C-alpha cells in the first residue's frame, strides 16, 4: 500500500504515475464558462500524472454554476482561485517566473475576446493579462458552437492571439459544435511547449546507452552488466529540455524509450561505432552534443566461429581477444565542434582516483566533460536505479553529485552541458 506523504494532499499521490515529462513544472489551469468545464478535471489529473503541479483558476460565475471549486481542489490537491483578494492571486500565479505554463481549457469566445482586447475583469482574464506580460507560455483550447467559432470576428481574435505567440489546440468539429480538444491533445501541446522553452531547445543531442556484445559463435557472446538505465535517462531528460535526441542503444534491461525522437538499436561495438560516426557525419543535421554513456566492450574475440562451438570436444576453450576501437576517440575526429561528454566507470576506487582517471580520459579523447562513477559502491552498482558521479571538466573542476536517481543525475549533467554550450556561445 502506498503511504501518503505527510503534509501532501492525497490527490497528489498520482503525480508522475504515467510519466515525468512535466516533472517540476507548475501549470495554471484556467477554466472558463463553457459547459465543457467539467472536462478540466480530466485534464488536470492527466497533467499531474505526467509530473505537473496544477493550480486551477475560474471565474465566480463558472464556480457557482458549472463546476464547484471543491471538485478542482480534489482534482489538483491545491487551493482554487475563484475570486481575487488582497493576496493578489493573479500576481502570485502569473508574475515573472511564478509558473511555467498557463492553459485555458475550455476557452470561450468571450474570454478570447477579452484576451485580445486586454480586458481583465475576472480571475481568469486577470491571470492571463499578467501571464502575457511576464511572457509565460499560454495554451488555449476553444470550445463553443461551430457557427460561433466560424464568426469572422472570433477568427480575427484567434489570429491576433496567435500572432502574439499564444498557442492554440484547435477544437474537434462534431455535431455542429466546436468541441474542446481531448485532454491528451492538450497534454501533448503542453509537453511540446515546455520543451520548446527548454535550455537545450534546438540542439541535436546524440546519446549512447547499454552494453555491446561480441560474438564467440552464433549464440555465445562476451558482454558486461550495463543496464542502459543511465543512457536512457539522459536521452529522456534531454528531450524534456528541448533537444532533438538520437539514442544509439545496445543491450540493456531498460526498455527502449518511446519518448525519444529517434532510437537506433545495435548489437556489437563495431555496429555502435558505425552508427555513432554516421550520425556525427550528417551534413544536414549538425550534432551539438554527444554523450557516450554506453558500456562498450573493451575486447572482442579475434575471430568468431561461424557455427556453434561443440562443448563436447573438450573441457577447455581458449579465446584470443583483441581490443575494440574506442568509440569515444572517434567523436572529435568526425565532428570537432561537437560538445563531448565521456563516461569513465571504475570499481573499488577512491574519490581522488576516480577524478584522476576521469581527467586522464578527458585529455586522451578530447572530451569537454567526463562523468566518473564507481559501480562497486552500495546503491550505485551496475543495474541499479541510482548513481553517484563525479563530473570533471577540462580545468579539472569537479562537480560531485551524491547518490540519487539516475533521472536526476541526468538532469544535473545536462544542466552543466547547457551552461557550457550556451555560455561558450554567448562568449563568442
Image (cartoon, grey):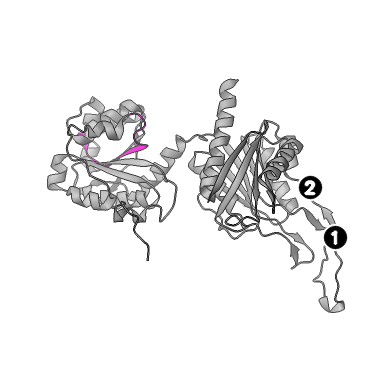
Question: Alpha carbon of mark 2 to alpha carbon of mark 1: how far?
Answer: 15 Å
Decide: is 197 above or below 182. Answer: above
Picture coordinates of residue 162 (x, y %)? 34, 31
Which residue bears the numbered disc 2? 325
Q: Nearer the viewer, residue 367 or 192?
A: 367
Picture coordinates of residue 336 (x, y %)? 71, 32
Q: Nearer the viewer, residue 338 or 223?
A: 223
Decide: is 317 above or below 27. Answer: below
- Magenta span covers which residues? 96-111
Relative side of 55 to 201, left or right: left
Residue 247 counted in the magenta span: no
Q: Is residue 65 visible?
A: yes
Quarter occupied by the N terminus: bottom left
Q: Which mark is residue 303?
A: 1
Residue 255: quarter of image: bottom right
Q: Residue furthest top?
A: 428
Decide: is 402 above or below 124. Answer: below
Residue 98 counted in the magenta span: yes
Residue ID at (68%, 49%)? 345
Q: Is residue 156 visible?
A: no
Residue ID at (35%, 50%)? 48
| Secondary-structure class at tag 2 | loop
Picture coordinates of residue 356 (x, y %)? 71, 40
Relative side of 291 to 158, left or right: right
Picture coordinates of residue 373 (x, y %)? 64, 48
| Secondary-structure class at tag 1 | loop
Amino acid at each position: 500500500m502506498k503511504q501518503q506523504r505527510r503534509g501532501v494532499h492525497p490527490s497528489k499521490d498520482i503525480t508522475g504515475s504515467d510519466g515525468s515529462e512535466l516533472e517540476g513544472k507548475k501549470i495554471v489551469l484556467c477554466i472558463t464558462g463553457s459547459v465543457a468545464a467539467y472536462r478540466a478535471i480530466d485534464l488536470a489529473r492527466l497533467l499531474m500524472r505526467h509530473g505537473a503541479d496544477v493550480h486551477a483558476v475560474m471565474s465566480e460565475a463558472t464556480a457557482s454554476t458549472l463546476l464547484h471549486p471543491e471538485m478542482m481542489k480534489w482534482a489538483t490537491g491545491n487551493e482554487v482561485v475563484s475570486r481575487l483578494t488582497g493576496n493578489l492571486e493573479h500576481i502570485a500565479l502569473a508574475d515573472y517566473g511564478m509558473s511555467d505554463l498557463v492553459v485555458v481549457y475550455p476557452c470561450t469566445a468571450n474570454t478570447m475576446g477579452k484576451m485580445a482586447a486586454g480586458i481583465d475583469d475576472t480571475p481568469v482574464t486577470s491571470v492571463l493579462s499578467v501571464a502575457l506580460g511576464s511572457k509565460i507560455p499560454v495554451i488555449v483550447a476553444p470550445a463553443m458552437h461551430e457557427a460561433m467559432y466560424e464568426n469572422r470576428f472570433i477568427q480575427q481574435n484567434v489570429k491576433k492571439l496567435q500572432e502574439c505567440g499564444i498557442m492554440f489546440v484547435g477544437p474537434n468539429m462534431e455535431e455542429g459544435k466546436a468541441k474542446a480538444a481531448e485532454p491528451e491533445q492538450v497534454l501533448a501541446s503542453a509537453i511540446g511547449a515546455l520543451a520548446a522553452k527548454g535550455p537545450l531547445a534546438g540542439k541535436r543531442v546524440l546519446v549512447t546507452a547499454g552494453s555491446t556484445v561480441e560474438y564467440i559463435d552464433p549464440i555465445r557472446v562476451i558482454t558486461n552488466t550495463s543496464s542502459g538505465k543511465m543512457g536512457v535517462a539522459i536521452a529522456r531528460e534531454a528531450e524534456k529540455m528541448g533537444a532533438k535526441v538520437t539514442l544509439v542503444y545496445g543491450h540493456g534491461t531498460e526498455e527502449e524509450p518511446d519518448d525519444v525522437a529517434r532510437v537506433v538499436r545495435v548489437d556489437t561495438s563495431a555496429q555502435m561505432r558505425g552508427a555513432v560516426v554516421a550520425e556525427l557525419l550528417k551534413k544536414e543535421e549538425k550534432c551539438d552534443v554527444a554523450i557516450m554513456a554506453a558500456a562498450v566492450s573493451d575486447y572482442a574475440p579475434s575471430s568468431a566461429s561461424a557455427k556453434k562451438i561443440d562443448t563436447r570436444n573438450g573441457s577447455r576453450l581458449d579465446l584470443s581477444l583483441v581490443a575494440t576501437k574506442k568509440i569515444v576517440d572517434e567523436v572529435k575526429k568526425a565532428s570537432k565542434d561537437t560538445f563531448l561528454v565521456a563516461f569513465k566507470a571504475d570499481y573499488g576506487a577512491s574519490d581522488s582516483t576516480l577524478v584522476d582517471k576521469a581527467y586522464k580520459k578527458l585529455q586522451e579523447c578530447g572530451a569537454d566533460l567526463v562523468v566518473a562513477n564507481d559501480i562497486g559502491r552500495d546503491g550505485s552498482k551496475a543495474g541499479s536505479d541510482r548513481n553517484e558521479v563525479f563530473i570533471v571538466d577540462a580545468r579539472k573542476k569537479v562537480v560531485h553529485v551524491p547518490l540519487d536517481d539516475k533521472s536526476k543525475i541526468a538532469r544535473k549533467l545536462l544542466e552543466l552541458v547547457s551552461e557550457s554550450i550556451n555560455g561558450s556561445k554567448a562568449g563568442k
